Image (cartoon, grey):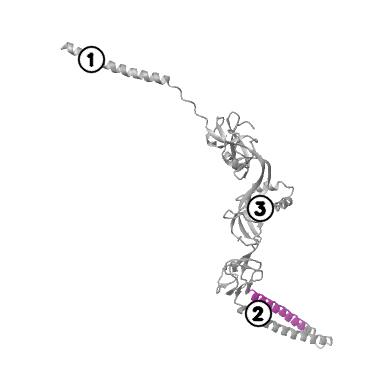
Amino acid sequence: MVCQGSFGIRSKLVRQMRHALCALACLSALAIAACRQEKPPPPRAPEVEVVRGIQKDVPIVHEWVGTTDGLVNATIRAQVSGYLIRQNYTEGDFVKKGQLLFEIDPRPFQAALDQAKGELARQEALHADAKANLDRVKPLVLLNAVSKKDLDDAIGVEQSTLAAVIAARAAVENARLSLSFTRITSLIDGIAGLARAQVGDLVGPSTQGGELTTVSTVNPIKVRYTINEQAYIDFMRRFATEAAGLKEARKLDIEMFLADGSRYPYRGTFFAIDRQVDVRTGTMRVEALFPNPRRLLRPGQFVRVHVLVGIRKGALLVPQRAVTELQGSFQVAVVTAGSKVELRQVKAGERVGSLWVIDEGLRPGEFVVSEGVQKVRQGATVVPKPFAATSSAVSGAPANPGGTPEPGTR
């Protein structure tokens, strides 16, 4: 029995040792395989699209949003109170200066005029009597037939009645003027707006401010837009005096684009600029005039104004997508010799279509990353490829006729 128990214990120990040896052999094999495994290859350099900075003369065009307005907007008001009895124009039509637009009931004013005429006739009669009396008294004074006081009284009555005649004549003119105000005419040639009152309404200076309609001169039509303070300074500092700057401003080429995106067929001219900068927005109001022979444009339309302010000689341009703006500063990724990336601060100027003028920080012929800017960092190596949109974005030049660009060469 003792021998059988010892044999069972040895068998169990043998099995455990075998299992341990198997596990150790597996671990050894794994360790040897791990040691023999090759190291992973380094990460590939990112591919980016690059474009060479182009230097050429470019027109500098500023774009602003504006609204159309009448050259003159004459508000037609009722100057006397009364009931509106007739509207003599079609709303929205062209009217001429002096054309009758509205009529107010004239009867009360005709009656007032007749009354004033009657009062004038009475005062003229009194004055004639006083003058005749004075003429009779004057010879009697020389004969000492009447006292000096009688002469003074006669003179006073004659002058008093003469003053009454003058006042009566003024009352007649005032009544006649009030009667004429019942016929409301246009003050200018232009487009008449919608009527603010209807036939039968009681109108007058105290009713809606007396406004009945507005007539606007629309040929030429005025376009009012705002420019920022910097644009004003950049333009005016080129001239010795303000008068010289304003004279040159009147020669500017101004284009207008309508709400549907179409180009207006007539060019505009500078008309006026406001006397001050708006302290809230830092902008100035500018007005331009455009011919409007077909009266296509009406006051209140929103338009885009393009102003050609000059030609930039030898400007250096890159696609706008190649420029990164960071808290008011601008940066481009320049690909140098050896396909190394240099993040460089630049001074950006005007935008020209899909391009951006670079004033400082970039030399002509240098390559900048235009696609894949987010992949690069300072000093990183990249695989440059030609920018696909170069041919259309930069003056129609081919993107890279020689194949893959070679940064660092010109």
On residue 254, the disc is 3
Local SS, label 1? helix
Local SS, label 3? strand
Disc 2/disc 3 C-alpha distance (Å):
55 Å
Residue bearing mark 1: 11
Point out residue 69 in the picture as x, y percentages from the top left corner. Answer: 62, 59
Say whether marks 1 and 2 touch (CB < 8 Å): no
Q: Residues within 10 Å of mark 3 (few under 14, many from 20)?
A: many
- Name which quarter of the figure residue 14 lies in: top left
Task: Name the residue nearer the viewer: 242 or 109.
Answer: 242
Point out residue 31 in the picture as x, y percentages from the top left corner. Answer: 39, 19
Residue plotted at (70% across, 83% down): 121
Say whether marks 2 and 3 touch (CB < 8 Å): no
**Mark before the other along the chain sequence, 2 or 3:** 2
Q: Please give the range of residues in magenta.
A: 153-181
Disc 1/disc 3 C-alpha distance (Å):
106 Å
The verdict on residue 162 being magenta is yes
Point out residue 188 in the picture as x, y percentages from the top left corner. Answer: 66, 67
Q: Amino acid at mark 3?
A: Ile
Local SS, label 2? helix
In the depicted structure, whether residue 278 falls above or below residue 346: below
In the depicted structure, whether residue 221 falls above or below residue 339: below
From the image, which quarter does the N terminus lie in? top left
In the depicted structure, whether residue 85 falls above or below residue 290: below
